[in-house]
Image: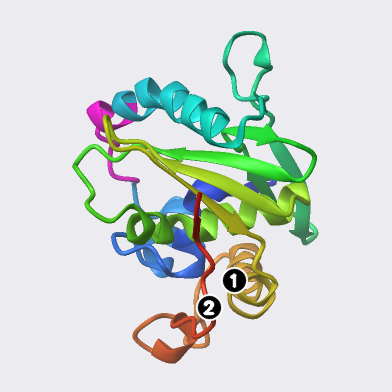
């Protein structure tokens, strides 16, 4: 029976190897069914859902523009974008993302609502840059307004598309990971932080602009 593997934006840091809690090889094992995914803390999830609308409102206040397709009232349902990536005779890999919203003609919106207080929102958002850049890649957009929403201390930032990060750091790892999914097993050539430490250190600039 054919298997379709979905590499989603929300989990792409695991594929790229930047997730501090789940290694590439463990995520590979989860996707092929050898290891079970740990249950998600529903309290954290509910907190994020509750705060998302407030984060959208903060983006609109800062930009003085309407956020569309954000799943709020008449502003339109969120849009899921999918793209066929690679396949073999039996299985295939697709890429997908569902941004929190669209703003203007060229930009996306992404809201993060940390459960615990974050003193440095700019530093906090950087761990989500793979997701943000991946969304831009799939949707063809040029940038993202990212809101780290904390009650009484929301912060809105603009993150432009980063071609160097995308093509030199992220996409090669996604292609490698997807290719191994089609093989169905890992071997010693699969890159990990233990065997190829320098490959997982991005040495370019990360442009996060506070609005």
Residue 17, relative to residue 137: is it above or below?
below
Q: Position of residue 158 (x, y in %)?
A: 56, 52
Q: Position of residue 137 (x, y in %)?
A: 71, 56
Magenta segment includes 53: no
Residue matched to label 2: 205
Q: Earlier in the sequence, mark 1 or mark 2?
A: 1
- Where residue 162 sits, quadrant-wise, is bottom right
Q: For residue 3, say whether it is visible.
A: no
Quote the CA–CA distance across marks 1 and 2. 14 Å
Residue matched to label 1: 170
Which class describes the residues within 10 Å of circle 1: few (<14), some (14-19), or many (20+)?
A: many
**Most foreground residue, 190 or 12:** 12
**Most foreground residue, 118 or 43:** 118
Residue 43, relative to residue 128: is it above or below?
above
What range is drawn magenta here? 37-45
Tally the marks: 2
Element type at marker 2?
loop
């Amino acid at each position: 029976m054919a298997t379709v593997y979905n590499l989603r934006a929300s989990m792409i840091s695991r594929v790229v190897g930047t997730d501090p809690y789940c290694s590439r090889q463990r995520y590979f094992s989860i996707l092929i069914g050898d290891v079970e995914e740990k249950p998600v803390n529903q309290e954290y999830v509910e907190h994020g859902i509750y705060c998302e609308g407030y984060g959208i409102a903060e983006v609109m206040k800062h930009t003085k523009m309407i956020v569309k397709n954000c799943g709020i009232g008449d502003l339109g349902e969120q849009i899921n974008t999918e793209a066929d990536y690679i396949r073999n005779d039996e299985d295939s890999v697709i890429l997908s993302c569902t941004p929190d919203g669209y703003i203007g003609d060229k930009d996306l919106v992404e809201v993060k609502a940390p459960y615990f207080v974050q003193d440095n929102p700019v530093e906090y958002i950087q761990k989500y840059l793979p997701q943000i850049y991946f969304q831009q890649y799939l949707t063809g957009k040029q940038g993202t307004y990212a809101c780290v929403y904390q009650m009484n201390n929301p912060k809105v930032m603009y993150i432009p598309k980063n071609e160097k990060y995308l093509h030199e750091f992220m996409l090669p790892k996604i292609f490698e990971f997807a290719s191994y999914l089609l093989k169905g097993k890992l071997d010693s050539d699969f890159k990990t932080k233990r065997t190829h430490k320098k490959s997982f250190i991005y040495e370019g600039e990360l442009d996060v602009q506070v609005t």
